[in-house]
Amino acid sequence: MGAEFVSLSLTPILIGVFAAVACALPGNFLLLRRQALIGDAISHVVLPGIVMAFLLTGVVAAWPMMMGAGVAALLSVVLIEVIRRLGRIEPGAAMGVVFTSMFAGGVLLLEQSDTSSVHLDVEHALFGNLESLIWLDAVGWSSLVETSALRGLPPELPRLALTLALVLGFTWLLWRPLKLSTFDEGFAQTMGLPTGLIGLSLVVVAAIAAVAAFDAVGSIIVIAMFICPPAAARLMTDSLEVQVWYSCVFATLSAILGYVLAGYGPLWLGFENAVSAAGMIATVSGMILAIAAMFGPCRARAGAPAEG
């Protein structure tokens, strides 16, 4: 039983947890800055960049994907500004047009491209490939300390572990500037803090987390984790420090319970087939948010900023 769990379930669960927490951490600050949908926007914008990177290189690799996603994000900013100026419409409408159009363009590119040799298609873009990220070289818990077995780990696991470490380091190093610029931007500016640069850095870190998680878990989990755990945590406390801890716990619970329920929930209910792990993880995160909205001690003050 232990050997089967380590080889078939341990790495997908860890990848799901790492991706969820890496997205939830910056999601706390984006939520308090009323920019929570930036995560949604990023997940839409990066798809055509990732597809173009694959078409140019012929391989699904981390660095080409990151560069392609970065170019796509830059292009989206330019298009939003052009549409806003030429069409004289509000920024929100321009953003909506660009984000949906670019995502649709990425879907069309996927459908017209020869991706039969790699795991990259429309379904993969939405749901990821979490269930397939198993550790075939593992023979039990002892494999965790065996160098030969560790070489067979899915590459998504160390990549997301590194991404989570980057997000944790960014949050720890810039905790005070992030907190000040989030709650009182004017006061932060009087203290000499570069609030514009801090906000840009937050978006960049969120984009890195989204791109790193995109290939493994798909856009559905990325969108859900940027919003649901931080929003549920906001309903539980008025303290930013406690909110961040709550969001990490909720993200971890969503990833673990969602993966388990996706595989065994239908069987417990008498159905024959499992369901999508990504879809179930997002569903569990939404259920946690719904419970927090009904019973959270701070639900009546959720619209107000948390305390520093």
Image (spheres, rainbow, N blue to C red):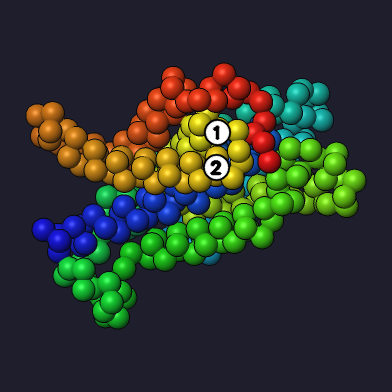
Mark 2 vs 1, N-terminal side: 1
- Asked if the residues shown at circle 2 and circle 1 are in contact, with their CB atoms under 8 angstroms apart, the answer is yes
Q: Give whichever of 70, 288 is nearer the camera.
A: 288
Please state, as top left, top right, bottom left or bottom right, where the N terminus lies in the image: bottom left
Which residue position is annotated with label 2?
A: 242
Q: Please say if 281 is above or below 147.
A: above
Res. 34 image quadrant = top right
Q: Residues under labels 2 and 1: Cα distance?
A: 7 Å
Q: Give me the residue at 21% from left, 73% from top.
A: 142
**Residue nearest the viewer, comparing 292 with 263:** 292
Question: In x, y percent, where is residue 51?
Answer: 49, 51
Q: Which mark is residue 237?
A: 1
Drawn side of residue 298 relative to residue 201, left or right: left
Residue plotted at (63% across, 28% down): 96
* Residue 18, quarter of the rendered image: bottom left
- 213 lies left or right of 146: right
| Image position of 5 with respect to 225: above or below | below
